[in-house]
Image (spheres, helix red, strand yellow):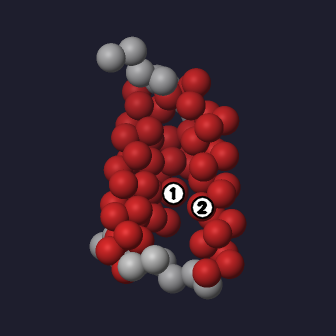
Amino acid sequence: MPYGYYMLLRLVATGVFAFAAFIAFDKNCKALPWVYGFMALVFNPIIKIHFPKEIWAVVDVASGILLLTTAKAVKTNV
């Protein structure tokens, strides 16, 4: 994949995790804001964390599972 794809992925993932952290904090969740904030830091495009390709694959799958399993806790009624 081109480098721009990964930069866009990092930007979108950071935004999603930061927004989820804000919503989880607003809903008075205990640990979720910290977990989401940590994931936003892992994916942030400014100060990049470099992992081998294999580790990124695990991080990507784990973060997707995290979002799917905790979606109900941060669901907004817009």
Query: Label 1 neighbourhood size at 10 Å, few (<14), some (14-19), many (20+)?
Result: some
Query: Label 2 neighbourhood size at 10 Å, few (<14), some (14-19), many (20+)?
Result: few
Q: Is residue 70 visible?
A: yes
Quadrant (top left/top right/bottom left/bottom right) for the C terminus: top left
Residue shown at the point (61%, 84%) measured from the top left:
52
The amino acid pointed to by label 1 is Phe
The amino acid pointed to by label 2 is Asp
Secondary structure at badge 2 equals helix
Find the residue positioned furthest to the front.
1
Q: Position of residue 9 (x, y in %)?
A: 41, 62
- Residue 38: which numbered mark, if any? 1
Image height check: is 59 above or below 73?
Answer: below
Residue shown at the point (51%, 82%) measured from the top left:
50
Q: Mark 2 points at which residue?
A: 60
**Front label number (2 vs 1):** 2
Q: Are marks 2 and 1 in contact (CB under 8 Å)?
A: no
Position of residue 10 in the picture relative to residue 71 (left or right): left
Decide which of 29, 36 is in the foreground and name it.
36
Q: Where is residue 31 in the image (x, y as percent from the top left)?
A: 60, 40
Q: How far apart are marks 2 and 1 (CA)?
A: 14 Å
Residue shown at the point (51%, 57%) measured from the top left:
38
- The numbered mark, 2 or 1, whose residue comes first in the sequence reads 1
